[in-house]
Amino acid sequence: MMLAVACVLLYPNSSAQAGGQTCRELQDSISENGSVILRYPSSTAQAPRRYDRFVADQSECPAHYETLKVRLLPALDTDACPAHVCWSDD
């Protein structure tokens, strides 16, 4: 099970820096590619940069992820650009 998740993260459809694009550009990139790994600053100054795999819809998620969750990303034009990540309550 863990191997499948690692492969998904290592071989994304695309990768980008969240803070270097507008919210619309981020959302368009996710829609066009199906999934994108985005790097973005942590909300706390001490924490390292974060990254996550953002998806256009549920079909981009591995089978054991039951739903999508909204994450708010910093973008050039807003500090709260909504994007979806795969989510499991387990």
Image (cartoon, rainbow, N blue to C red):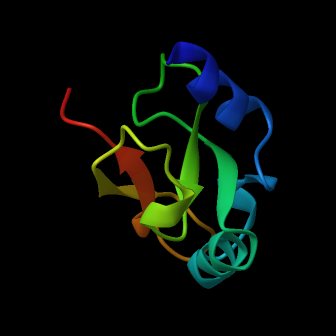
Q: What's the residue at 48%, 16% (across, down)? A: 46
Left/right placement of residue 14 relative to residue 21 reads: right
- With respect to residue 37, does 33 lie above or below? below
- With respect to residue 63, does 69 lie above or below? below
Q: Nearer the viewer, residue 38 or 67?
A: 67
Q: What's the residue at 72%, 69% (across, down)? A: 21
- With respect to residue 20, does 47 lie above or below? above
Q: What's the residue at 50%, 18% (across, down)? A: 1
Name the residue at the left extreme.
89
Left/right placement of residue 78 relative to residue 40 reads: left
Q: Nearer the viewer, residue 89 or 76?
A: 89
Residue 42 percent location from the top left of the image: 49, 33
- With respect to residue 11, does 66 lie above or below? below
Residue 89 percent location from the top left of the image: 18, 34
Q: Nearer the viewer, residue 71 or 9?
A: 9
Residue 38 percent location from the top left of the image: 66, 48
Residue 64 percent location from the top left of the image: 37, 37
Q: What's the residue at 76%, 46% (across, down)? A: 12
Q: Nearer the viewer, residue 53 or 57?
A: 57
Q: Quadrant of residue 44?
A: top left
Location of the C terminus (image quadrant): top left
How many numbered marks does the figure carry?
A: 0
